Image (tube, helix red, strand yellow):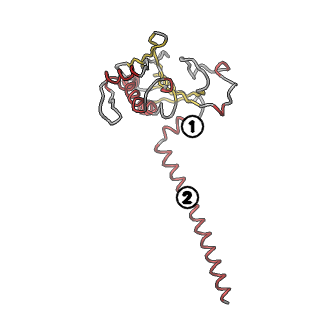
Amino acid sequence: MENAVDALKMAAAVLTFVLALGISMSSFSQARETAQILIDYTDRESVTQYAEDTNSKTRIVGAETIVPAIYRAYKENYRILFYAQDGDPIELYKKRENGTDVSVNYIDLEREVLGNNRQQDNFIMALLYGTNANLQTADGTPISWSNFTSELAMNNSRITLNSQGIYDTILEGNTFEERFGVYYQEDLLPENYDPDTDIGDEYDTEETPDANKTKKRVISYYMQ
């Protein structure tokens, strides 16, 4: 009789454990779904931009979309290009190439010689706001425009910044058509590569498998 009671107790304990395990798994699943919903809502812009690897997806956007994309350009490893209504490039800064100052209409920090994260952040701020940028040292101390440009020169960056940032142009333009593209960093592309038009075998490299390459996303903004 005593053995039967013990067996019943063990069976009840096992049943309780199974029920608790089932409830826990269900709770974890619901928690994961809830967390994913929160992530989707808090970073909906990022999900919208990077959900598809296609250069045919377009939409009309304003400063509320473009400015956050510029801030994320380095950390997310993508390239941003700007064009005027007539399709001409919008100059963001100049870079000396072979003794000549070349106009640059893109943000692609992979191609620039910048010393550290703080200098990269200051560079983005300078591109956005020009001489009105809030430039800071690593400990948060403000630095002047002239000191920052001198710092860039010491880095041998060959960069000449514009006094007026792209932010004013974005506000004046009101809206831009946003286009998406993608390429691989290991593929050698020309400086004036446009993912909206330069598509074909001439930009494909078969020597390196795509699985071993680093995918880089491209966003082009055309003023409306």
Q: CA distance from mark 2 to mark 1?
A: 26 Å
Q: Is residue 107 above or below residue 51?
A: above
- Outermost residue, front side: 154
Dot 2 amino acid type: Phe
- Give the left or right position of residue 164, taking residue 51 as reference: left
Q: Secondary structure at mark 1?
A: loop
Residue 12 position within the rendered picture, expressed as x and y whole percent measured from the top left: 62, 77
SS category of the residue bearing label 2: helix
Q: Which mark is residue 108?
A: none
| Residue 168 percent coordinates (x, y) | 36, 24
- Identify the mark nearer the N-term, 2 or 1: 2
- Considering only vertical position in the picture, is 153 above or below 20? above
**Residue drawn where x is 32% and y is 23% of the image:** 147
The amino acid pointed to by label 1 is Ala
Residue 63, horizontal then vertical, whole percent: 41, 30
| Residue at the spot 46% in from the left edge and 9% down from the top edge | 99
Drawn side of residue 163 relative to residue 176, left or right:
left
Q: Position of residue 110 (x, y in %)?
A: 50, 26
Q: Are marks 2 and 1 in contact (CB under 8 Å)?
A: no
Can residue 87 be spotted in the picture?
yes
Report the disc number at residue 28: 2
Give the labeled residue for mark 1.
51
